[in-house]
Image (spheres, rainbow, N blue to C red):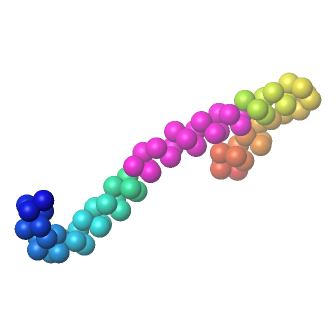
Amino acid sequence: MKYLWKLRLYFRQVAGQLVLGSLCGIVMNTAVILPPILLGRLIDEALALDRVKRASGTSALPPCFSSAGLS
């Protein structure tokens, strides 16, 4: 504990860098995990639309593209 107390002057000098590094780490981790989550949702929606298509006989392709942001 004494070691950390002695380092407080150093932490004051680099506080901005520590905060910026922490924020960038959060953004990086979010950027890594967000695409698989969105892809999984898109796959789930496509499967649900396929089930609706089979039941009603209509085309499910345009809603699938709109949910992916392609239209």
Q: Work out whether 16 lies above or below 2.
A: below
Q: Is residue 35 above or below residue 27?
A: above
In the image, taking residue 58 as reference, residue 21 lies left or right, namely: left
The image shows residue 40 at horizontal and vertical percentages of 59, 36
**Magenta span dominant secondary structure:** helix
Residue depicted at x 11% and y 74%: 9
Q: Is residue 44 magenta?
A: yes
Compared with residue 2, is residue 38 higher up or lower down, i.e. above or below?
above
Q: Quadrant of the N terminus?
A: bottom left
| 42 relative to 12 in the view: left or right | right
Q: Quadrant of residue 20?
A: bottom left
Give the x, y percent position of residue 25: 33, 55
Quadrant in the rendering for residue 2: bottom left
Q: Position of residue 5 (x, y in %)?
A: 12, 67
The answer to whether 62 appears left or right of 21 in the picture is right
In the image, which residues are magenta?
Answer: 29-46
Q: Is residue 20 above or below residue 71?
A: below
Q: Nearer the viewer, residue 69 or 11?
A: 11
**Residue occupying image coordinates x 15% and y 75%:** 13
In the rendered image, residue 14, in percent from the top left (x then y), is placed at 17, 71
